[in-house]
Image (cartoon, grey):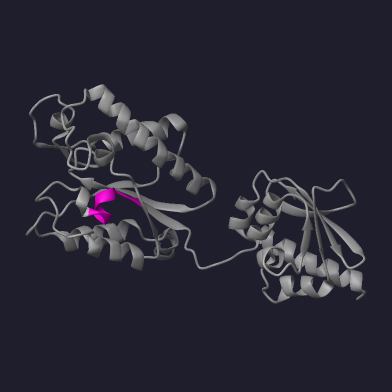
């Protein structure tokens, strides 16, 4: 092999690595840049096309990378991250926008992330937003949190809509007209919907959006006290309907055309109440990786 062919083969290795990685493919979405590699005295071109990298002939260039064949060999064969070569050591020099250098370096970073997350009702992680007497745990529902962590899923803590809209001690309970209150809840929901959309667009598996039954706000299958919170009446019995936050979340996802992830509730645990083990078993079943389902079929 000549030196030029060796450099070309190394670039093919890098290119194939990017094109075979679903995460990398999504990271490159809408980038559509032409990169000129200058390796010693040789020049090669990469073109991004709908999230995949192709070699191209000489053409107008958006971004230039300069380095030696030895550095390219480290990148392709020895696991040296392009990100470090660009930003830490300077072993690979670039000409172009800082933003493009970041994005190109980010393309080849790998780690142990599962790319699986759950969206969790706020007070499972922070019992201090619960009402007095409504928390079995001092700080967080440790058994539930441990189950999720051991399953390898990231936990996205959703905002507490009652904290945001009623205050920490819920001093605005029943004091705000129902439609205004729903509007406030909708504002909180919009931020959650933004996060859901971004995770989905980048190929993450949202294994569940977990509410707390029978919360008037974050209940999913059951809610209780929704009428009193909205100032519409004195009815406090449990009903087979979602709380206000999850009603608004379902509406926003539908209006935005966002595919809803699995949504389910876990019943809150009151002091001295039994049944937590069964609730945890149900959560574990619901968040099983999809591959495990197909393997057992």
Is 93 rendered above or below residue 209?
Answer: below
Q: Position of residue 219 (x, y in %)?
A: 22, 42
- In this view, the residue in front, 2 or 34, is 34
Q: Residue at x 36, y 47 (%)?
A: 262
Quarter of the view holding residue 187 = top left
Q: Residue at x 36, y 37 (%)?
A: 189
> Left or right: 88 with respect to 125?
right
Q: Residue at x 19, y 41 (%)?
A: 222
Q: Position of residue 181 (x, y in %)?
A: 26, 28
> Left or right: 272 with respect to 69?
left
- In this view, the residue in front, 146 or 95, is 95
> Left or right: 68 with respect to 18?
right
Quarter of the view holding residue 138 = bottom left
Q: How many tags in the picture?
A: 0
- In this view, the residue in front, 121 or 290, is 121
Q: Position of residue 73 (x, y in %)?
A: 77, 74
Q: Residue at x 43, y 65 (%)?
A: 295
Q: Quadrant of the N terminus?
A: bottom right
Range of magenta residues: 119-126
Please check the rendered image and state whether residue 267 is part of the magenta-colored stretch, yes or no: no
Q: Quadrant of the C terminus?
A: bottom left
Q: Position of residue 39 (x, y in %)?
A: 86, 66
């Amino acid at each position: 092999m000549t030196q030029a062919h060796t450099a070309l083969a190394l670039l093919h290795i890098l290119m194939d690595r990017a094109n075979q990685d679903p995460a990398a493919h999504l990271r490159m979405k809408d980038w559509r840049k032409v990169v000129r590699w200058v390796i010693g005295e040789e020049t090669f071109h990469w073109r991004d096309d709908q999230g995949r990298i192709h070699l191209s002939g000489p053409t107008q260039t958006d971004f230039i990378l300069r380095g030696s064949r030895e550095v390219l060999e480290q990148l392709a064969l020895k696991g040296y991250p392009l990100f470090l070569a660009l930003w830490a050591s300077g072993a690979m020099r670039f000409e172009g926008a800082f933003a493009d250098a970041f994005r190109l370096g980010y393309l080849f970073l790998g780690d142990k992330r599962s790319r699986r997350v759950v969206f969790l009702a706020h007070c499972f992680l922070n019992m201090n937003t619960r009402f007095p007497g409504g928390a079995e745990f001092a700080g967080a529902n440790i058994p539930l949190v441990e189950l999720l962590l051991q399953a390898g899923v990231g936990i996205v803590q959703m905002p507490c809509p009652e904290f945001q809209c009623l205050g920490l001690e819920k001093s605005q309970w029943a004091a705000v007209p129902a439609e205004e209150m729903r509007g406030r809840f909708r504002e909180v929901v919009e931020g959650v919907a933004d996060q859901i959309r971004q995770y989905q667009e980048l190929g993450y598996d949202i294994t569940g959006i977990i509410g707390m039954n029978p919360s008037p706000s974050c209940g999913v299958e059951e809610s209780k006290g929704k009428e009193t919170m909205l100032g519409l009446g004195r009815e406090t019995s449990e009903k087979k309907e979602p709380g206000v936050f999850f009603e608004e979340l379902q509406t926003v996802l539908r209006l935005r055309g966002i595919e809803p992830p699995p949504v389910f509730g876990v019943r809150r645990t009151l002091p001295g109440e039994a049944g937590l083990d069964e609730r945890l078993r149900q959560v574990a079943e619901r968040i099983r990786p999809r591959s495990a389902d197909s393997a057992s079929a």
